[in-house]
Amino acid sequence: MRIRHRLPLVAAVACFCTAGITGRLLQAQSATPVTFSGVVLADDRTPLSDAVLGVERSGQTLFRVRSASDGHFTFTDIPGGFAALTVRRLGYVQRRLEFDISAAIAKDPLEIMLTPVATDVEAVTIEGATDWSRGGRSIYFRDPDGHLLELATPGLWTVY
């Protein structure tokens, strides 16, 4: 009789251990690093440089790259699993794509199309520029509130 009562307990323990091992195997497979690439294009299929792409999980950006002058980008060693890819560039509507990052996605490059959006950017007038004798250069301009601002290159200050 004692053997019959222990049999369900042994079966339950065996199932629990098997489920744990299977879960770890699946987790290990999804965590396999993946490299994937693609190109960011305008709606007229013109490559877009300087688009910022980010891989997000749980609302946090974990990896970020910029598209090159030909619109191409590459993410390397991204842990597999479900994630969101956000793509943004000044003058275009931001895109958010959600997908499972796996070896399958690495086979074919992604094509991401962005739609232009009207952007009002005020003109900035350079009020002055100076080439300093110790090296470095400064330019002067005003912000929208009228404050005079300076941008300086390295070499202007001994500590910079």
Image (spheres, rainbow, N blue to C red):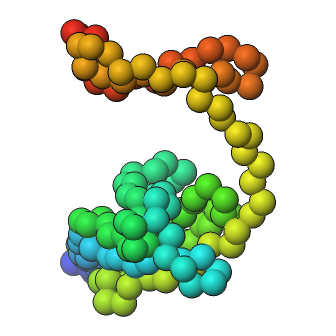
Answer whether residue 78 is visible to the viewer in this image: yes
List x then y, in percent, for residue 13.
Answer: 27, 70
List x then y, in percent, for residue 27.
Answer: 30, 69
List x then y, in percent, for residue 77.
Answer: 24, 65
Question: In the displayed structure, would residue 78 be above or below residue 90?
Answer: below
Q: In the picture, residue 44 is in which quadrant?
A: bottom right
| Viewer-closest of 127 and 41 | 127
Horizontal relation, residue 1 to residue 109: left or right: left
List x then y, in percent, for residue 85.
Answer: 50, 66
Residue that sits furthest to the top in the current view? 158
Number of labelled discs? Answer: 0
Question: In the displayed structure, would residue 2 be above or below residue 44?
Answer: above
Answer whether residue 101 is visible to the viewer in this image: no
Q: Quadrant of the N terminus?
A: bottom left
Tell me the residue at 59%/29% (across/down): 126
Tell me the residue at 38%/85% (across/down): 109
| Viewer-closest of 34 and 112 | 112
| Viewer-closest of 73 and 148 | 148
Tell me the residue at 27%/73% (across/down): 35
Q: In the picture, residue 41 is in which quadrant?
A: bottom right
Question: In the displayed structure, would residue 156 be above or below residue 15?
Answer: above
